[in-house]
Image (tube, rainbow, N blue to C red):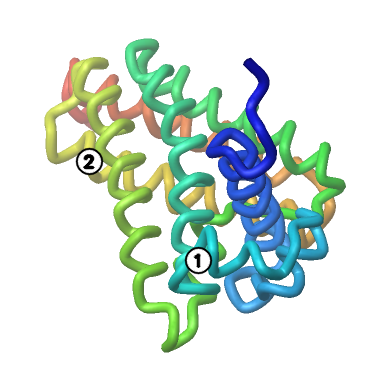
Amino acid sequence: MQPRSGTPTKRGATRTKMLHSAVDVLRERGAAGVTIDEVLTRSGAPRGSVYYHFPDGRNQILTEALRMAGDSITTLIDEAVAKGGIALIRTFIEFWDRSLVDDDFAAGCPVMAAAIGSGDDEPDLVGVAGTVFGHWRDALARAFVADGLESADAESLAITSIAALEGAVVLCRSLRSTKPLHDVAEQIEFLIRAREFVNRFGVPSQ
């Protein structure tokens, strides 16, 4: 039996489309750019659907869109953890290289956008962004530990990697080139291998 208009299947499709539209705006314009009018324009949803699907209005749309975006990248990272730290970094690089080029450098990381661009009326966004970054850090740290690093070194290296890669994405957008991303990746891989060497053989004597 085909679902009738107004059944959960259709309602769910409209809601999902609105969230995808909000993610696109968040990546391009930051949290401040995610307005109800812009989400409706991009999704083609009727105005009456906003408070039907999102009773708490714009803040709910923003929070759920950020979780959706964060979960999609988190899934990619989680699937690559077992391959080791360098493979995980390369997965991240491949993802952002493709995304930046496909979007003609017009869109960046939605998690970064929410973390640094949220207003006083959007307190939940910073917390959600922090949770997502924390998950990425933990996943990278697990990969580094599996590679043989001590837990403290693995966590520190994970934080360094995320900070460098997120900064590289910002530079790529500004320079309209993926070169910063690959330059940073090369240095992170060197740092990982150097840390593994020191962990195995100790600091070389002068």
Q: Does 156 sit left or right of 118 as displayed?
A: left
Q: Which residue is mark 2?
A: 155
Q: Quadrant of the N terminus?
A: top right
Give x and y (percent) for residue 40. 75, 64
Q: Does 199 sit left or right of 116 as displayed?
A: left
Between residues 89 and 185, which one lies in front from this camera angle?
89
Question: Can you say whether 65 is above or below 75 in the image?
Answer: below
Question: Can you say whether 202 is above or below 191 in the image?
Answer: above
Q: Quadrant of the C terminus?
A: top left
Specify few, some or many for label 2: CA neighbours under 10 Å numbering under 14, 14-19, or 20 or more.
many
Specify few, some or many for label 1: CA neighbours under 10 Å numbering under 14, 14-19, or 20 or more.
many
Which picture quadrant has residue 26? bottom right
Mark 2 or 1, nearer chain start:
1
Mark linked to residue 102: none
Residue at 13% over, 29% down: 150
Mark 2 and mark 1: Cα distance apart in space: 23 Å
Residue at 19% over, 37% down: 153
What amino acid type is highlighted by mark number 1?
Ala
What amino acid type is highlighted by mark number 2?
Glu
Which secondary structure, mark 2? Answer: helix
Q: Which residue is mark 1?
A: 114
Q: Does 35 sit left or right of 72 as displayed?
A: right
Give x and y (percent) for residue 164. 49, 50
Give x and y (percent) for residue 106. 80, 56
Q: Is residue 104 visible?
A: yes
Between residues 164 and 41, which one lies in front from this camera angle?
41
Q: Does 31 sit left or right of 35 as displayed?
A: left
Which picture quadrant has residue 179? top right
Q: Is residue 183 visible?
A: no
Q: Nearer the viewer, mark 2 or mark 1?
A: 1
Between residues 138 and 7, which one lies in front from this camera angle?
7
